Image (spheres, rainbow, N blue to C red):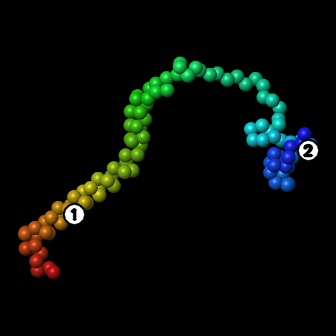
Amino acid sequence: MRPTQALRGGGGDAPIGQHGKYLGSWGNFGGRKQRGIITYTMSNNRQNPIAGAAHDAVFNTWRRFSKQVLYFAPPMIFFYYAMSWATDRNHYLNSKEGRKEFADSE
């Protein structure tokens, strides 16, 4: 039985492949069967999925932090001190001494 046009890849002008043969669906393009592939597996009860997770978390976090700290620390420190200065200046200007000093400037 011949595959329908939808199975050939959709559309009326989809290529059938070399020599008019159906290529197959994704992952199975009708080529030669692969041979000589060896796979190894381990039983689920023999695996330890969190082996070394705490150690890796500490050192990986430190590595990533040390690479990025110079990008965010200097601007953070600058804006912290700028905001601290602005807050102190605002408190001074709204105090009795500040109002007395700058009363005639308005």
Residue 78 on image: x %, y %? 29, 56
Residue 54 drawn above or below residue 75:
above
> Quadrant of the rendered structure where residue 40 is?
top right
Task: Report the residue marked by disc 2.
Answer: 20
Measured in 3D between alpha carbons, the distance from the residue under mark 1 to the one under mark 2, in whole angstroms, is 79 Å
Instruction: Residue under label 1, please give it.
Output: 86
Quarter of the image where one finds residue 54: top left
* Horizontal side, residue 4 vs residue 41: left or right: right
Q: Is residue 56 left or right of residue 44?
A: left
Q: Amino acid at mark 2?
A: Gly
The structure residue drawn at horizontal position 91% and vertical position 44%, both measured from the top left corner, is 20
Q: Secondary structure at mark 1?
A: helix
Q: Secondary structure at mark 2?
A: helix
Q: Position of residue 16 (x, y in %)?
A: 87, 46
| Residue at 81%, 49% in the rendered image | 6
Q: Residue at x 38, y 37 (%)?
A: 62
Local crowd size for mark 1, using a 10 Å CA cut-off: few (<14), some (14–19), many (≥20): few
Residue 30 in the image: above or below residue 35: below
Q: Nearer the viewer, residue 13 or 102?
A: 13
Amino acid type of disc 1?
A: Ala
